[in-house]
Amino acid sequence: MSTPPGESRPGEVDPHRLRDGELALHGRVMPASNATFVGEVDGVRVVYKPVAGERPLWDFPDGTLADREVAAYRVSVSLGWNVVPLTILRDGPHGPGMVQVWQEPDPEQAAVDIVDVDSRPAGYLHVFEGLDARDRPVALVHEDSAPLRRMAIFDMVVNNADRKGGHVLAMPGGHRYGVDHGVTFHVEDKLRTVLWGWAGTRVPAGDLAVVESLLDSLQGELGAELGELITPDETAALTWRCRRLLSTQRMAVPQDGWPTIPWPPF
């Protein structure tokens, strides 16, 4: 069901090519909370986030965001849902950092959107309502699709504190990639996402079976890999979140005392 780290899926870039090729930078993504560059490795367009460019956070240890991005990719691989594009750690022009294969979304698709409050598209779930810059009533919605639901489950498992709408890439053909996973794996519940449309609903049995397989992997090779990227307490918390999901069999619901929607949502 999953592809071992170091091996590539059909049509996916070889990780060794990404790791060993020369990283040439073409520009910087502005604005971004942390230093983020667009570049190329051996003809493959990539995003590069050097550890030296990470902005300190009050609730995450300094210099750990690149490791968390790679840990999120490893969990994505183990799940077999291909939520996170190929992501590795390697050296670059600004020192060690995270390098991820660039994914170009379909501009004609919007997996997450802000629409007129009375105009929710068919096949979309309502998240919340508010006012736009002109004080007009609008609603945040997202599509009701299996790929996006699995991304929401992935976020529950890795405890993603920053699933903005712009972090969901709607790809041609219906696949959905998630990016920007630097603030994940905290030991405290910090789930903050725009994907609340399934809140409290039952998780499909097939998805639960995949989470159960992930739990098994955490006792073996995946657990050892994550031990090089996140702390033992964070790995234990990941294991606990998997068990909680298997016990409740329900999608998460917003909790009091924590801002459960990232701001801005896009």
Image (cartoon, helix red, strand yellow):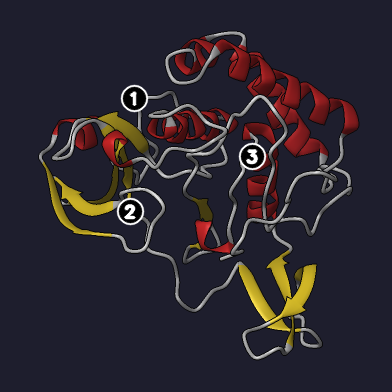
Q: CA distance from mark 3 to mark 1?
A: 21 Å
Q: Secondary structure at mark 3?
A: helix
Q: Which residue is located at x 52 percent, y 31 percent?
A: 60
Q: Secondary structure at mark 2?
A: loop
Residue 128 is labelled as none
Tell me if residue 62 can be seen. Answer: yes
Using a 10 Å C-alpha cutoff, classify the residue at mark 3 as few (fewer than 14 neighbours), some (14 to 19) or many (20 or more): many
> Where is mark 3, residue-wise?
154
The C terminus: image quadrant: bottom right
The percent coordinates of residue 38 (x first, y second) are 24, 55
> Where is mark 1, residue-wise?
6
Residue type at mark 2: give it. Answer: Trp
Q: CA distance from mark 1 to mark 2?
A: 18 Å
Q: Nearer the viewer, mark 3 or mark 1?
A: 3
**Residue 1 drawn above or below residue 266:** above
Residue 102 is labelled as 2
